[in-house]
Amino acid sequence: MIDIAVDVGSGLTKVQWSEGRAFFPSLSGAVEQSESFDYQEAEGAEVEFRERKFLVGEKAKLSVMPSQLENTLDDRWFESDAYLALFYTALSKTLPEDYSGKIHLCTGLPQAAYRACTEPLIERLAAKHTFRVNGKRYRTSIRREDLQVMPQVMGLFISQLRRDRSLQVQKVALIDVGTYTSDWTIVEDCKTAHWASGGMPVGIADVIRRIKEYLREDLGMTASDAAISRAIRLKKIQWQGKEVDLANKIAEAAFDASQMIIEEIDKRWEGAKDATLIVGGGGGPLFGPAMRTHFAHARVVQDKEPFFSVVNGYYTYLTERRKQKAA
Ligand SMILES: Nc1ncnc2c1ncn2[C@@H]1O[C@H](COP(=O)(O)OP(=O)(O)OP(=O)(O)O)[C@@H](O)[C@H]1O
Ligand SMILES: [Mg+2]
């Protein structure tokens, strides 16, 4: 049976399987069955199931009005068909065409949605699924016992445990900084402490917004979010043939956004001095230095592409479970 790990984030959907990993923007919107678009050049997918059609990724961005795209910040978006369309797109990356069979699946939910949405999500996913992605048909069935749903931040923990086994016996505080949201928890004995867990809608998007304002107001420059996201990673942007250094502005914006998270966390963690503190997610490298001004002992995840850490943890969970079963 195939092991598949899927992390549907508010900004990026990530998938990992035995042969690799992939990601695409979490953009998804329904279109009329009869509509057909000329979007050959765009990346993404056309997903059909239960007589509905969705566009996903770049294709959705080009062809669906922004107001018609699924809002990934809605509390209940995990129950939407648009969410399922992202899921199916992820599965299609891993399965051979015309696949028909069972899969082992591990996925997760943000802390804020975990309690309320886990059971409904299991209900939806532990079922038979027939869908088409870009015209190719897939049929999978997922049994309850072959499905694991965990808090996303637990995926981050497992991925780091793989690098450092000693975390198993430590008290580990984790902060997962994502696109639109951040989640946190404390893990002890490989269990998350409810009192120490939470999340809030602050993430990389807040830094993008601030840099966007700065570029517009100070330089009269309008740049797309994608261009700013790239500029944030490079710490600079090209404008009128010149290079604009953004390092200080980015650090400032990341510092301010981090303060909001720290304020929330500190009410519960009391400095977390007795814990190993790990900052990860796609926003780890961006928020990490600012987090360290408050939590001096914070370590930033060293994964090459830190937005893959959570899904990597899910995949590790599946392979470890397989080994345990075989033993
Ligand atoms: N190489 C890269 N390619 C694309 N995005 C990147 C890259 N490096 C960092 N990023 C940033 O990381 C973000 C994705 O991070 P991550 O996957 O952790 O967030 P998420 O899971 O979508 O969000 P959340 O956890 O809040 O739901 C992107 O939106 C982008 O801003
Ligand atoms: Mg995430």
Image: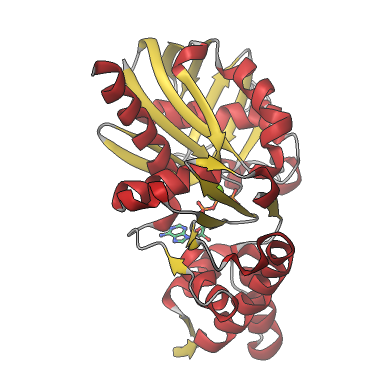
Q: Position of residue 118 (x, y in %)?
A: 65, 27
Q: Position of residue 12 (x, y in %)?
A: 52, 47
* Quarter occupied by the C terminus: top left
Q: Position of residue 73 (x, y in %)?
A: 71, 46
The residue at 70%/48% (across/down) is 195
Q: Position of residue 174 (x, y in %)?
A: 53, 56
The residue at 47%/39% (across/down) is 44
The residue at 63%/63% (across/down) is 205
Picture quadrant where residue 310 is located: top left
Q: How many marks?
A: 0
Front residue of 314/325: it is 325
The residue at 39%/16% (across/down) is 103
- Can residue 57 be seen at all in this image of the molecule? no
Q: Measured along the vertical axis of the image, is residue 189 above or below residue 257?
A: above
- Can residue 252 be seen at all in this image of the molecule? yes
Picture quadrant where residue 321 is located: top left
* Quarter occupied by the N terminus: top left
Display colour scheme: secondary structure
Q: Measured along the vertical axis of the image, is residue 257 above or below residue 243?
A: above
Q: In the rendered view, does 178 fall on the left or right side of 158?
A: right
Q: Measured along the vertical axis of the image, is residue 257 above or below residue 162?
A: below
Q: In the rendered view, does 119 fall on the left or right side of 129?
A: right
Q: In the rendered view, does 73 fall on the left or right side of 243?
A: right
Front residue of 131/164: it is 164
